[in-house]
Amino acid sequence: MCQRYALPDQAAVEREFLPTRAWWSFTTKYNVVPQQYVPAIRRHDGQSEAVMIRWGLIPSSAEGRPSESPLTIDADAMLASPMFRGPGLEGQRCILPLSGLFAWQLTNRRYRQPPFIRLLERSVFGVAAVWDRSVSEEDDVIESCSMVCVAPNDLIVSVANTDGHMPAILRRKDYQTWLRGTPAAAMATLRPYNKSGMQAYPVSPRINSTAPDDSGLIQPAKFA
């Protein structure tokens, strides 16, 4: 988890994160899929910078070849991974803005029912991520990222019982620590989000396809 998420509109994201420099342009999306370019907030020259970045990290060592591009990395494994250790230690951390995310629950009938998961008091929130910059032999540059994941809380376990982690949702007070703090301080911000501040409800299986992108995807499912 997470392989799909919903993206708020640009104005709402900028009110939440107040980037010093904004180089991005995007609209509301209800079905963000892997390998798309997504908005991210990161640090640059001591200031916050808002950019578009590819979801699915391509390490610098790949020289622009997307042979492996993981969407997520477990926080516990990040600093031990050759692919993620450098970005984690060298401050190549960023935040991905979300309005909610999708999971898939395997029911007793072996049917994968998708729920939508959101925060009750925050219509826009940030998930910790790390990024890297890869340059091909032709000097084409790809900047890409992976979400950081942590152990699931009880809500996630109950609605996504086919997976063993959840995105590292940051508290607002931890945004700057994740972006600017020492590796130890940044890692300390990564913890399961309090389940009491979250809501999950079943939605249409249309989200099983990457093609739809409309507000109906996040509406509660109507069962006969």
Image: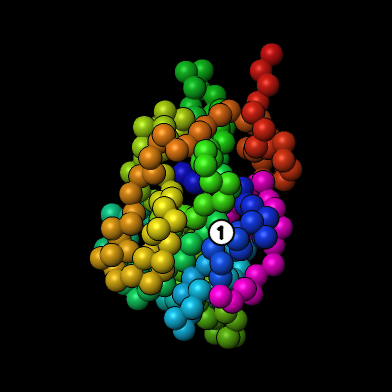
- Residue 84, percent across and down? 36, 66
Q: Give above or below for 223 relative to 2.
A: above
Residue plotted at (60% across, 61% down)? 15
Which one is nearer the viewer's eye here, 126 or 207? 126
Q: Residue at x 46, y 75 (%)?
A: 43
> Which residue sits at x=57%, y=36%?
116
Residue at the spot of label 1: 16
Asked whether, in this view, residue 200 is left or right of residue 175, the answer is: right
Extent of the magenta region: 20-36
Residue 163 point in image, percent of width and height: 41, 38
Q: Which colour scheme is used?
A: rainbow
Q: In which quarter of the image is residue 38?
A: bottom right
State whether the magenta stretch is mostly helix, strand or loop: loop
| Residue located farthest toward the top when viewing the structure as drawn | 224
Q: In this view, does 39 lie above or below 153?
A: below
The residue at 56%/67% (across/down) is: 18
- Residue 139 is situated, as x and y percent measured from the top left of the image, at 58, 86
In the rendered structure, does residue 28 fall within the stretch colored magenta?
Answer: yes
Nearer the observer, 172 or 60: 172
Q: Is residue 87 magenta?
A: no
Inspect the image, locate mark 1, and give the three-letter code of the amino acid beneath it.
Glu
Quadrant housing the C terminus: top right
Picture quarter containing residue 160? top left
